[in-house]
Image (cartoon, helix red, strand yellow):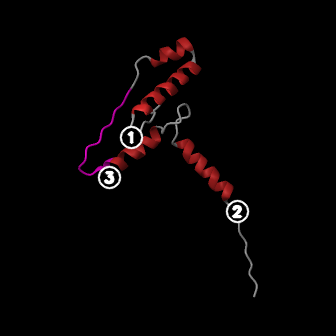
């Protein structure tokens, strides 16, 4: 009896696909879920919540461009990270914080 096997190792390809999926759903600056990820998550949460209440809070800091203009993008990015960490510290484990990013 002979067994002939011909195959291709797709491990690296699967890793690359997973990395692309993560990049497509993660904000580069804060490592939070991004607009794409949250737009997928909201309908899922609504669907499983049935009759229970859900909440959605949208924060949009006024004049943030002035921070970047006055102090530079590195400072602005660091500020976003620190604010994100402070908000995350206030959230319960089942609550999600995402960054929609600028358009």
Residue 102 in sight from this viewpoint: no
Please give the label number shown on residue 9. 2
Query: Residue 52: within the magenta?
Result: yes
Crowding near the residue tagged with mark 3, few <14, some 14–19, many ≥20 C-alpha atoms within 10 Å: few
Crowding near the residue tagged with mark 1, few <14, some 14–19, many ≥20 C-alpha atoms within 10 Å: few
The quarter holding residue 24 reads top right
Q: Secondary structure at mark 1?
A: loop
Tell me the magenta residue range: 46-59
Check the image and report above or below for 9 versus 88. Answer: below
Horizontal arrangement in the rendering, residue 3 relative to residue 16 (left or right): right
Look at 48% across and 14% down and name the residue there.
Answer: 66
Q: Please provide percent x and percent y for residue 83.
A: 46, 25
Horizontal arrangement in the rendering, residue 2 relative to residue 94 (left or right): right
Residue at which label 1 appears: 95
Look at 55% across and 47% down and name the residue there.
Answer: 21
Horizontal arrangement in the rendering, residue 88 relative to residue 30 (left or right): left
Please give the label number shown on residue 48. 3
Check the image and report above or below for 34 versus 68. Answer: below
């Amino acid at each position: 009896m002979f067994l002939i096997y011909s195959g291709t190792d797709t491990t690296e390809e699967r890793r690359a696909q997973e990395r692309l999926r993560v990049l497509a759903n993660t904000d580069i600056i804060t490592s939070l879920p991004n607009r794409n990820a949250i737009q997928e998550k909201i309908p899922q949460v609504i669907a499983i919540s049935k009759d229970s209440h859900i909440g959605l809070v949208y924060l949009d800091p006024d004049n943030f461009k002035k921070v970047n203009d006055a102090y530079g993008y590195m400072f602005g990015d660091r500020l976003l990270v620190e604010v994100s960490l402070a908000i995350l510290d206030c959230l319960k484990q089942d609550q999600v914080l995402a960054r929609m990013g600028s358009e």
